[in-house]
Image (cartoon, rainbow, N blue to C red):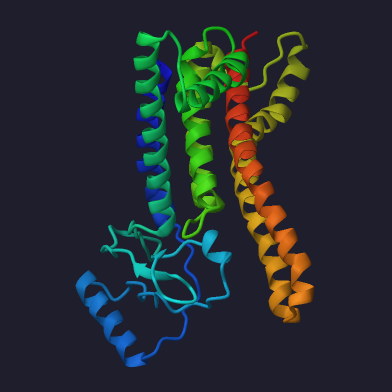
Amino acid sequence: MTNLRTTSRLLALTAMLLALPAASRAQEPAPQPVHSAETTATRVAGQEQALGTAEAEPAEACAKHDPADIITPHITDSHCMEIPWLTWPTMSHEIELPRWKPIGHFRGQPIDISPTKHVVMMLFAGFLACLVLISAARSSRRTHATVGRSTGFATGIESMVLFIRNEVAVKNLGHHGEGYAPFILTLFFFILFANLLGLIPYGSTATGNIAVTGTLAIATMIVIEVAGMRANGVGYLSTIFYWNKDLGIVMRVVMFLVMSPVELAGKLSKPFALAIRLFANMTAGHIVVLAFIGLIFTFKSYAIGIAPMGMAVAIMMLEIFVAFLQAYIFALLAAVFIGQIRESHH
């Protein structure tokens, strides 16, 4: 239960930290036509005046999108968010999220930390993960005190936690690496909920944003390097600078000059691989579904549309498995990388 509580706290902190880079890297969709150009111009001018800067980005025309486009909103980021609404045929309505004044500039570009759709989804994923894990922990503690074991929904959550802790984290973190298990659990559950939120109506896949997966990878890299420093002390430098004492001094220097850049590149390639793998897999599934559904509108035939629709449904079912798989792979690789650097002195 200690792991559950620690993981819940880490999930809340992770969601807050990830909100900043995702907001600054929001992928703005192309502006859409509105009913009144004068109304839009007035709203944009009012926004720029309120922000006190002429460099403010123009406000998006929310609720002005192609009703046939039901896929791309799940993977693209914007300052508008879709909510349930009783309007036929879309049954949805887009609202504009708050826009804040830029906190500064970098190379002439404003640093905008206004909340975006992916920021909201990440905070919601963190909230759901905390709610599920904390509720399961309390239920498990209560039932353990009465019947001696977990029951109901808490049993399933406890099984997932124990599997990730014992089979993924502890087995790969190395000797006395249990202290990093809460971090691995945090990665798994946060990514899992973020992935699943992109598969439901009105949701969006925050992990389909390279800024989000990149931040997760950077946070993982920091934990990996800190774990290596704590485990190896001064010996940590050997993971950067190649110095083979079994070679002669001449070859030792040559290999030092050749292999040290390779060792450094290897360190940088690990977070890069983590970020690209998660981003690409969570985006690819939606693109395939978009391609199948696009065939229906291309041929404009109910008969031809049956097969693409069936394939799209099959891909969406596969996406549920992929959501779990990618969360598992990210957590597994993070545990493997931490275990490798902790044992590097051997």
User: Which percent across, then down, holds residue 14?
Assistant: 40, 37
Q: Is residue 240 in view from this perspective?
A: no
User: Which percent across, then down, holds residue 148?
Assistant: 43, 8
Horizontally, residue 4 falls left or right of residue 258, namely left
Residue 53 placement: quadrant? bottom left
Q: Quadrant of the N terminus?
A: top left
| Residue name at image x 61 percent, y 41 percent | 272
Is 307 in front, or is 340? 307
Horizontally, residue 147 falls left or right of residue 198, namely left
| Residue name at image x 59 percent, y 12 percent | 174
Is 123 in front, or is 113? 123
Q: Is residue 134 above or below residue 196?
A: above
| Residue name at image x 26 percent, y 64 percent | 101
| Residue name at image x 69 percent, y 32 percent | 262
Residue 315 placement: quadrant? bottom right
Q: Residue furthest front?
A: 147
Q: Is residue 65 above or below residue 170?
A: below
